[in-house]
Image (cartoon, helix red, strand yellow):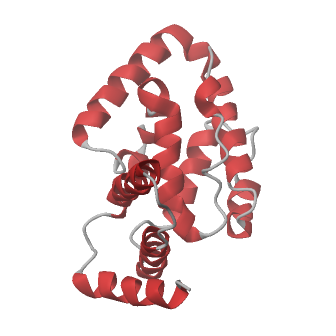
Amino acid sequence: MVVGSFRHSKCRVYLHEDLPHHIYLLLDILGLQFRWVLTRVCLGRTIVSVDKRIVDDQKEHAWMALYANDSDVLETLLYRRLQTLWHDCTDALAIFSKHSACTKLCGQKVWEALITVFLLNHKRMQTVLFAREFSNLMAWDGHSKADVDRHFSNVSNTLEMLTFLGSNIDITDVFKAVILATMATP
């Protein structure tokens, strides 16, 4: 059992508004083979489409058929990876204190607790996240075609990452974020 794609430093969580980017990158890192580790229970199932859940369920059943006796190893890997990625977010320390690595399904319990406490539809978090993303997109600093390609690649990543926020965002929320972003831009 190899879960080598679990390495990536860019999805650390420092603040609540880092969570959507964190989820996007974790799902990308885990890829099709191991995405089911995050999408197999309650709230985790809501972060992907129905079609992706079906694929994830099939991948989970296939993996469990071969490695059911080693599922605790996968749980511990997930737990330790989440602990590393959330280390700098002191608000999450209580969750890791409550669920230790010695607990059955430790990775799932921590993942579920994290996305329960750090809600994706929290209005302040969404506004700050939008403002940060708008500010990054407005901070154009390039001259070459490669710079343009890189900038618009960031736009695509931002749009993909924002899909986790749901549909409770209205024009007022976007307007607040744009105002906040322009205040932050030098």
**Among the 4 quarters of the image, the one containing residue 39:** top left
**Picture layout, residue 83 above or below residue 38:** below
| Quarter that holds the C terminus | bottom right
Give the camera-side residue of 106 and 85.
Answer: 85
Q: Position of residue 138 (x, y in %)?
A: 43, 74
Give the camera-side residue of 48 and 74.
Answer: 48
**Picture layout, residue 158 above or below residue 37:** below
Disc count in the image? 0
Which residue appears at 35% of the width and 53% of the height? Answer: 156
Give the camera-side residue of 83 and 68.
Answer: 83
Which residue appears at 26% of the width and 44% of the height? Answer: 49
**Picture layout, residue 113 above or below residue 34:** below
Q: Position of residue 142 (x, y in %)?
A: 49, 62
Q: Position of residue 1 (x, y in %)?
A: 62, 14
Give the camera-side residue of 14 and 92.
Answer: 14
Specify whether 96 is left or right of 47: right
Specify whether 63 is left or right of 106: left
**Picture layout, residue 67 above or below residue 126:** above
Which residue appears at 56% of the width and 63% of the height? Answer: 18
Specify whether 116 is left or right of 32: right
